[in-house]
Image (cartoon, rainbow, N blue to C red):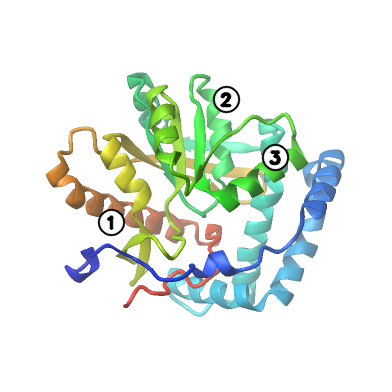
Amino acid sequence: MASKADDVTRPREGAAEWVTHRERGSMTMLRIMAFLSLRLGRPGGRLFLHLIAAYFFAFAPTARRHSRAYLRKVLGREPTAEDRYRHVLTFATTVHDRVYLLTERFDLFDITLEGESVVQEALEKGHGAFLMGSHVGSFEMIRAIGRRQPGLRVAMAMYEDNARRLNAMLAAINPNAATDVIALGHMDAMLKIQEYLDRGTFVGVLGDRTLGNEASRRIAFLGQPARFPVGAMRAAAIMRRPVIFMIGLYRGANRYHVAFEPLADFSAVEPRQRDAAVQAALERYAALLEKHVRRDPYNWFNFFDFWRGGHD
């Protein structure tokens, strides 16, 4: 439970650590991996994963240090080298599987689904909803759910640099892949989100990272305060929309588990109740995230100091 001091919302100074990290890899490498993976098939393409994972395990000391710190928290013990390598390999696997998901090769995966009725109920109301995900597991698995729900349309709202990378990745892997992307940080971003919602489209957001200079709140997570961004949840409250927690977890071989859970429903929240409702929703989001990473700890893909700034 957050303390009264933790309820204070305030912008942070400077960029968050994850923003300042230089992205490893290149579009050329992505194109090569996509070319080889699509021609060799998933089993053949997976032969490269151990080489890639071993490289990052050996030559990415910052990510390795933060991986160990996270695993220490979630496992409740000192992680072994096997734990730390498995963490990196899980990340590499989900990135690799994007090639097949973005080319709609859903037949390659054994996907189990939990909470489909939560999405179906929101879909039937026709008012749109927010899908709140995280940098845990594979958000692209939502496309597999779209195949089961033909009427489900999802637009992704993300920071502008991430939007550019996503568009570049789509162009490299499948130029015909149609994905609606809303770049945050522009004056008209909220208007675009409202327009999509009014058409019954779901808006997907990742709620576990801040840019560092935006409003955030301290929430207890894995036994230590961490900062979670307020913006997406506050937007949902202002627009009076439901928020659904979504997570797609990799569980080895070709198995994924996708779960949806009700997170918040702001449809009847009055303006004077908004701040408390947002606080409660953020706390529930952190609690759901913690539940799932404790169950599937190697799916955590925030390779930076996630708890930085949580104590000040």
> Above or below — where is 5 with respect to 257?
below
- Residue, disc 2: 147
- Residue, disc 1: 283
Name the residue at the left extreme: 272
Three-letter code, disc 2: Arg
Nearer the observer, 252 or 104: 104
Nearer the observer, 47 or 300: 300
Q: Circle 2: is it few (<14), some (14-19), or many (20+) Cα within 10 Å?
A: few
Q: Position of residue 153 (x, y in %)?
A: 50, 26
Between disc 2 and disc 1, whose residue precedes? 2
Between disc 2 and disc 3, whose residue precedes? 2
Three-letter code, disc 3: Leu
Q: Quadrant of the N terminus?
A: bottom left
Q: Circle 3: is it few (<14), some (14-19), or many (20+) Cα within 10 Å?
A: some
Horizontally, is 298 left or right of 254 in the view? left
Marks 2 and 1 sit apart, C-alpha to C-alpha, by: 32 Å
Q: How many marks?
A: 3
Horizontally, is 312 left or right of 202 in the view? left
Q: Quadrant of the C terminus?
A: bottom left
Q: What's the residue at 49%, 68% (across, down)?
A: 15
- Tag 2 near tag 1, CB within 8 Å: no
Three-letter code, disc 1: Glu
> Above or below — where is 77 with respect to 126?
below
> Above or below — where is 295 with respect to 244?
below
Is residue 250 at all visible to an observer of this figure?
no
Element at badge 1? helix
Element at badge 2? helix
Element at badge 3? helix
Mark 2 or 1: the one toward you? 1
What number is the disc on residue 170?
3
